[in-house]
Image (cartoon, rainbow, N blue to C red):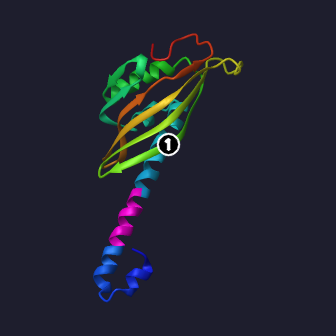
């Protein structure tokens, strides 16, 4: 409904209430999508900073992390332990996500993005790095702490560079 349609109706009280409710619902979807994007940016930023405590708080307690050929891991603490150990050899990292999209369904949501990970083991030689790329698929849950990851799946499509230690291997 447009504002013109709203003001043309004889009973504007009910129409106005319905119009405002519709606007509130649309704004809520936008706020939810922004919160999910902020969550995923925090996921990347805290991983790159190796702030594993903050990083692990991106997940619900019973989360599932499916890293394709590198296995599936369950529970916030286990996911933290596996990822912290896997990324320990990299003294510098950059997790980048592009093309993020989210679908909201009440207190759950799904999302997708493309990952480009670069890990450097020797900051004195940044030209030697290991890269991984592929699409992410996520499921999220709204919690009292805000939106959190409940399931994450990465399909590794490509890798580049030589690595001395296998990521999640």
Quadrant assignment, res 25: bottom left
| Residue stretch in magenta | 20-29
**Where is residue 72 shown, x and y percent of the image?**
35, 21
Q: Residue furthest top?
A: 164
Left or right placement of residue 41 versus residue 141 in this view? right
Residue occupying image coordinates x 33% and y 29%: 64
The part of the image, by quadrant, that contains residue 119 is top right
Could you tell whether 30 is left or right of 9 in the image?
right
- The secondary structure that most of the magenta stretch takes on is helix
* Image position, residue 115 (x, y; %): 53, 32
- Figure check: 132 above or below 169: below
Q: Position of residue 168 (x, y in %)?
A: 45, 17
Membership of 160 in magenta stretch? no
Q: In the picture shown, does residue 123 fall above or below 31? A: above
Q: Quadrant of the N terminus?
A: bottom left
Identity of the residue drawn at 48% across and 31% down: 135
* Towards the viewer: 105 or 118: 105
Determine the secondary structure under disc 1.
strand
Q: Tell me residue 82's x, y (percent).
A: 40, 20
Residue at 38% from the left image edge and 81% from the top image edge: 6
The mark tally for this picture is 1
Question: In the picture, which quadrant includes the C terminus?
Answer: top left
Q: Is disc 1 surrounded by few (<14), some (14 to 19) or many (20+) residues within 10 Å?
A: some
Q: Nearer the viewer, residue 133 or 76?
A: 133
Would you say 99 lies left or right of 26 here? right
Per the image, is 24 magenta?
A: yes
Q: Which residue is mark 1?
A: 100
């Amino acid at each position: 409904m447009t504002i013109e349609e709203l003001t043309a109706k004889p009973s504007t009280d009910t129409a106005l209430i319905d119009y405002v409710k519709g606007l509130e619902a649309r704004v809520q979807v936008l706020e939810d999508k922004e919160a999910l994007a902020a969550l995923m940016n925090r996921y990347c930023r805290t991983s790159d900073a190796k702030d594993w405590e903050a990083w692990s708080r991106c997940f619900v307690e019973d989360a599932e992390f499916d890293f394709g050929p590198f296995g599936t891991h369950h529970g916030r603490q286990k996911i933290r332990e596996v990822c912290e150990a896997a990324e320990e050899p990299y003294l510098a990292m950059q997790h980048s996500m592009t093309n993020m999209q989210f679908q909201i369904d009440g207190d759950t949501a799904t999302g997708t993005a493309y990952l480009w990970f670069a890990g450097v083991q020797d900051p004195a030689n940044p030209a030697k790095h290991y890269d991984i790329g592929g699409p992410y698929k996520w499921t999220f849950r709204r919690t009292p702490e805000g939106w959190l990851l409940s399931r994450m799946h990465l399909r590794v499509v490509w890798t580049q560079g030589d690595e001395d230690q296998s990521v999640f291997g």
